[in-house]
Image (cartoon, helix red, strand yellow):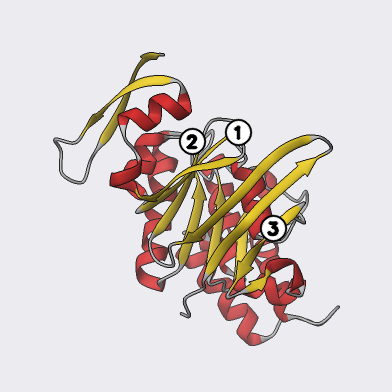
Amino acid sequence: MDIMHLQFDNLSYHIGPAAILRDIHADVPPQGIVGLIGPNGAGKSTLLRAINGLIRPSSGSVLVNGRSVTRIPERQRARLMAMMPQNPGIGFGFTVEEVVAMGRYPYLSRLKPLSNRCRDVIAESMATTGVAHLAERRTTHLSGGERQRVFLARALAQEPQLLLLDEPIANLDIKYQLEILDLVQQLHQKREMQVIVAIHDLTWALRVCTHLLVLKEGSLVAAGPTADVLTEALVEDVFGVRARLALEQPGEPRLDVLAPV
C-alpha cells in the first residue's frame, strides 16, 4: 500500500467567533498508529473531519501528498481515506451486508450495480471484521460492539490508505474494546494501513498508539512518539489531573489517575 504524506499547514477552524482549531502545524507520521488525545472539546473530532475534507478550514489547510484535501474530488478522497465517526448512523431497515456495501460508492457510477470485484471486497471486509455471519441481520438488531465492527467493515470496503477512527471504543464493554483495538492493530500490521484514532482512554493510547498528537483548547501542544509524549507532567498540564505511569509490565503499560490538580 502506498504511503500517504499528511500535513497540517497552520490549520484553523472557527464557528462564528469561537476558535475550534488554532494554527495547527505538523507532519503526521506516515507509519504507526497515531492517537489524537485531549480533553473533551479539545478539537479531536473536528480535526478528523478536517482531514477527511468534511469541513473547510477557516485558514490554513490539510495537505495530502502536498495537495489541499479540499481540492481533491470527493470520490477520489474516499478512495484515499475512510472515516468511522463516533456515532455512525445505524440505517434503519438495512442489513449488515447492505451497510458494508455502502463503502463501495467511490468505485461505482450512479445506479450502477455492484461488480464482482465489489462483492469480493464486501465479503472480505465482513470476514476481516468478524461480521460475515451477520450479513443478513438488520443493523438495528446488533449489539454495540457488533455495530462498531460493521461500520469498520464499511470503512474497509472503501479500500483506503488511511483509516480515521473517532472514539471507536466509546461506550463499549471491555471485551469489545479489546476486540476493536486488536483488530485495528492487525489492520495496521497486516495491511500496512495508516491509522489515526481519537481516543479518550489514556491507558489504551499508551498501549496501542505508536505516536500521539495532543490537543488542548484547539491547539496542538505536543506531538511525537507515545513514550516521549505521554508523561505525567503532560497529563497534569493538559487534563488537569495528577497521574502515575506504571511501566513495570513490558507491553502492558498503565496510567493511573490519582487526583485532580
Image quadrant of residue 32? Answer: bottom left
- Which callout, 1 or 3, points at the residue further toward the start of the chain? 3
The 10 Å Cα crowd at callout 2, few under 14, some 14 to 19, many 20 or more, is many
**Numbered marks: total:** 3
Name which residue lies at 48% across and 80% down.
2
Q: Quadrant of the C terminus?
A: top left
Name which residue lies at 59% across and 50% down.
24
The 10 Å Cα crowd at callout 3, few under 14, some 14 to 19, many 20 or more, is some
Q: Is residue 139 above or below residue 80?
A: above
**Closer-to-camera residue (52/241):** 241
| Residue 177 image position (x, y, % from top left) | 43, 41
Query: Is residue 135 in view from this perspective?
Result: no
| Residue 232 image position (x, y, % from top left) | 31, 29
Q: Is residue 144 above or below residue 97?
A: above
**Mark 2: which amino acid?**
His
* 70 to the left or right of 120: right
**Mark 3: which amino acid?**
Gly
* Residue at the spot of label 3: 60
User: SS at mark 2?
Assistant: loop
Query: Marks 1/3: CA distance?
Result: 18 Å
* Residue at the spot of label 2: 200
User: SS at mark 3?
Assistant: strand
User: SS at mark 1?
Assistant: loop
